[in-house]
Image: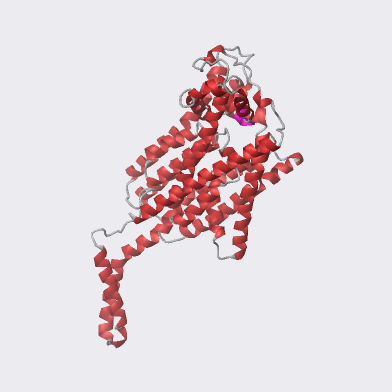
């Protein structure tokens, strides 16, 4: 009960810090917009939707009561936020808009036509759409911060480390995107929640959350790897420890079904794009990707419109962007190396696997023995050792025999104590593999400057930075403080550049 109280109080601390961080970012956005002129002011332009049917269900209003407030809110929408607001208002009108997945626009449209609909006559519908996006992103971030703390406690087994890591997450270098009309907050909430619940054993909830993460960002489909890891671990236990190949096969099939389910939303959206763009036209009018044996809309959009591809961004003129991304990439690589070495030590132990499920907590092998009996055995063992110098050889041999039996009784308790940190290390494995794959992708395939926000929802970054901050090594502590400076500077730099439509990440 006491432990739950401590965790509950620290969750409230995390929630307050997350709220303060969002208020700080929003204040900075307003401040920089008042001081500096934006580079591009075209965000306020709002041509009518191409399809008349797109306006169905949109609240109709006459003159707006506070037009200047509405115009200011509309002008604050920049970069990808323009696409998300336009999709929420008019749907998918152009081919390139299908690069933006539907969860965020759908949620914005729903909020603007329900919770925030009374504001439409006051500031206008498009401003309400933008306001809905801001509210959704910031609220989702608050929940994501709490789930990040819970996940950190579950994996690290250290509430203090979890709290430090959560504070770092609240002020992460991509903070501006978590308070803007971007899908980062929704994705962080769904992915962190899904990982937490799969590690807790709530597989159905985890499956739903991770599937939704795939409809927020395309990399959400990678979260299927967590169920693959769970299935392999259960299969290993079934074959090696339980000698039950049927149980192993069931674990593999169950993991495969859950993994496929996570891909469904992303694949369904690609099919939706194929139906809208490819069907109904002649073969001469079809877009190139429509003619492929396996049409890949998202891959085509990324390559054709944004120049995404293997090593395609390795150009001299992109050197500033590589420098901009170098801090987060360096932090990711150091995190991977640090935890990989820890995992290497873990798997070198004679026995690594103690649990049947990812969420199972260590338990004593001999559950019928009470803790009182174990404590009594410990006392007897200590007493016999104290009298060892005054016994003859025969009695000493008898005592050693009894000591050996007592040690055998104590072995389950030792296994329990040893298994706790080992469980946390094993849970690190899929998280580190996931971070390694995303780091490789962001460096070699994507626009490298996007790495700052692409990797920002990866827990090991903050766990490693938290570890450095309390390291007994003075050099490591200095690196930890330098990471904090990097976080703070990117919060300031991002709120200045991004909000005024200057390139950031």
Percent position of residue 373, x then y: 24, 67
Which of the 4 quarters of the picture holds residue 320? top right
Residue at 47% of width from left, 29% of height from top? 265
Residue drawn at point x = 53 percent, y = 22 percent: 120
Locate the N terminus and report the quarter of the image it occupies. Answer: bottom left
* Residue 259: percent from left, percent from top: 44, 36
Residue 312 visible, this orientation: no
Residue 100: quarter of image: top right
Give coordinates of residue 39: x percent, y percent.
72, 32
Q: Quadrant of residue 455?
A: top right
Q: How is the image coloured?
A: secondary structure
Q: Nearer the viewer, residue 490 or 479?
A: 490
Q: Please state if 352 lies on the left or on the right of 222 as rendered.
A: left
Above or below: residue 24 compared with residue 257: below
In screen coordinates, is 501 left or right of 403? right
Q: State which region is magenta.
A: 77-82
Instruction: Give the tally of numbered discs.
Output: 0
Query: Can residue 327 be seen here?
Result: yes
The C terminus lies in quadrant: top right
Q: Is residue 80 magenta?
A: yes
Q: Which residue is at a point 55% across and 54% down the rendered structure image?
A: 464
Residue 58 percent across, percent down from the top left = 51, 17
Q: Is residue 155 left or right of residue 35?
A: left
**Residue 29 vertical placement versus 480 (above, below):** above
Q: Residue furthest front?
A: 65
Question: Residue furthest toward the right?
Answer: 316
Q: Is residue 195 left or right of residue 368?
A: right
| Picture layout, residue 42 above or below residue 344 | above
From the viewer's side, name the closer residue of 505 and 432: 505
């Amino acid at each position: 009960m006491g432990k739950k109280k401590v965790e509950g109080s620290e969750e409230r601390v995390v929630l307050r810090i997350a709220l303060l961080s969002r208020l700080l970012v929003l204040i900075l956005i307003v401040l920089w917009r008042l001081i500096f002129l934006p580079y591009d002011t075209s965000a306020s332009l709002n041509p009518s939707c191409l399809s008349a049917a797109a306006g169905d269900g949109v609240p109709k209003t006459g003159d707006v009561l506070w037009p200047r407030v509405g115009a200011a809110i509309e002008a604050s929408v920049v970069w990808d936020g323009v696409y998300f607001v336009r999709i929420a208002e008019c749907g998918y009108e152009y081919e390139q808009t299908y690069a933006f997945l539907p969860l965020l626009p759908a949620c914005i449209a729903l909020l603007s036509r329900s919770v925030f609909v009374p504001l439409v006559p006051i500031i206008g519908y498009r401003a309400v759409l933008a306001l809905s996006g801001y509210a959704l992103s910031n609220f989702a971030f608050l929940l994501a911060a709490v789930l990040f703390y819970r996940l950190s406690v579950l994996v690290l087994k250290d509430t203090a480390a979890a709290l430090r890591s959560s504070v770092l997450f609240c002020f992460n270098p991509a903070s501006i995107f978590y308070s803007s009309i971007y899908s980062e907050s929704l994705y962080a909430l769904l992915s962190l929640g899904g990982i937490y619940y799969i590690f807790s054993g709530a597989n159905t909830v985890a499956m739903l959350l991770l599937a939704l993460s795939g409809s927020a960002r395309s990399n959400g489909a990678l979260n299927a790897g967590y169920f693959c890891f769970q299935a392999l671990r259960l299969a290993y236990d079934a074959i090696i420890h339980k000698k039950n190949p049927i149980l192993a096969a069931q674990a593999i099939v169950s993991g495969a079904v859950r993994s496929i389910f996570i891909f469904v939303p992303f694949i369904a959206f690609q099919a939706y794009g194929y139906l809208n763009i490819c069907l109904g036209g002649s073969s001469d009018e079809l877009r190139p990707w429509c003619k492929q044996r396996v049409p890949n809309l998202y891959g085509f959009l990324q390559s054709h419109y944004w120049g995404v591809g293997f090593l395609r961004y390795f150009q001299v003129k992109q050197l500033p962007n590589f420098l901009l991304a170098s801090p987060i990439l360096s932090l990711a690589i150091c995190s991977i190396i640090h935890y990989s070495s820890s995992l290497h030590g873990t798997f070198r132990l004679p026995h690594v696997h103690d649990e049947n499920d990812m969420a199972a907590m260590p338990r004593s092998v001999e559950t019928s023995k009470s803790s009182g009996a174990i404590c009594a055995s410990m006392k007897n063992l200590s007493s016999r050792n104290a009298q060892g110098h005054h016994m003859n050889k025969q009695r000493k041999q008898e005592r050693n025999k009894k000591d050996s039996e007592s040690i055998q009784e104590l072995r389950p308790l030792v296994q329990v104590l040893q298994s706790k940190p080992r469980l946390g290390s094993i849970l690190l494995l899929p998280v580190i593999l996931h971070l390694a794959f995303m780091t490789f992708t962001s460096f070699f395939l994507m626009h490298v400057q996007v790495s700052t926000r692409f990797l920002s929802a990866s827990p090991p970054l903050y766990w490693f930075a938290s570890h450095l901050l309390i390291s007994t090594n003075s050099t490591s502590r200095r690196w930890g403080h330098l990471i904090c400076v990097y976080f703070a500077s990117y919060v300031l730099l991002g709120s200045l550049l991004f909000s005024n439509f200057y390139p950031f990440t």
